Image (cartoon, rainbow, N blue to C red):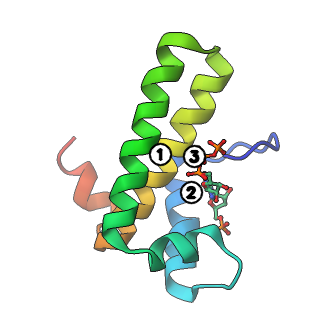
Amino acid sequence: MRGSGTVKTFDELFAELSERARTRPEGSATTQALADGVHAQGKKVLEEAGEVWIAAEHESDDRLAEEVSQLLYRVQVLMLGRGLSLEDVYRHL
Ligand SMILES: N=c1c2ncn([C@@H]3O[C@H](COP(=O)(O)OP(=O)(O)OP(=O)(O)O)[C@@H](O)[C@H]3O)c2ncn1[C@@H]1O[C@H](COP(=O)(O)O)[C@@H](O)[C@H]1O
């Protein structure tokens, strides 16, 4: 989540991003990230994972939580980029 105090769950974010994938609205970060393709999406996952690691070792709980939220976002974009559903993933948990 970016900032603003409203709480959103993992599943709610995925539903929102799925809608972005379906409608591809202009000006949406997700529309752009999906257009960038799986290679770029994978690089973002790795980049955010690195930021999570650094935050975990050196930064505040709040900064860590923010980086984790960005990682979750990037993982969801990658899932949508490859056409995976939540169920595809959850059945392995
Ligand atoms: N949760 C996110 C989210 N997290 C990260 N990002 C994107 O990722 C960018 C930051 O990633 P960068 O790789 O630029 O990160 P960075 O360079 O390390 O920058 P910072 O970490 O300093 O921000 C943000 O500017 C957004 O474009 C997100 N973009 C969208 N969402 C949510 O996704 C939903 C749909 O958003 P739209 O597609 O924009 O409508 C909304 O609920 C949004 O809140």
Q: Is residue 46 left or right of residue 91?
A: right
Quadrant position of residue 60: top right
Q: Which residue is mark 3?
A: 9
- Mark seen at residue 13: 2
Residue 39 in the image, given as x and y percentages of width and height: 31, 66
Give the x, y percent position of residue 71. 47, 43
In the displayed structure, 67 sits above or below 74; it is above
**Amino acid type, label 3:** Thr
- Is 92 situated left or right of 5 in this image? left
- How far across and down, in percent of the image, does residue 93 sit? 22, 40
Q: Is mark 1 within 8 Å of ligand 1?
A: yes
Q: Tell me if residue 43 comes above or below residue 79 in the rendering.
A: above
Q: Kindly check if marks 2 and 3 are in contact, taking CB atoms under 8 A apart as contact.
A: yes
Residue that carries the numbered disc 1 in the rendered image = 72
Mark 1 or 2, which is nearer the eye? 1
Image quarter for ligand 1 = bottom right
Is tag 1's residue or tag 3's residue first in the polypeptide sequence? 3
Tell me the amino acid under the disc marked 1. Answer: Leu
Which of 36 and 15 lies nearest the eye of the viewer? 36
Q: Residues within 10 Å of mark 2 (few under 14, many from 20)?
A: some
The residue depicted at 49 percent of the width and 60 percent of the height is: 14
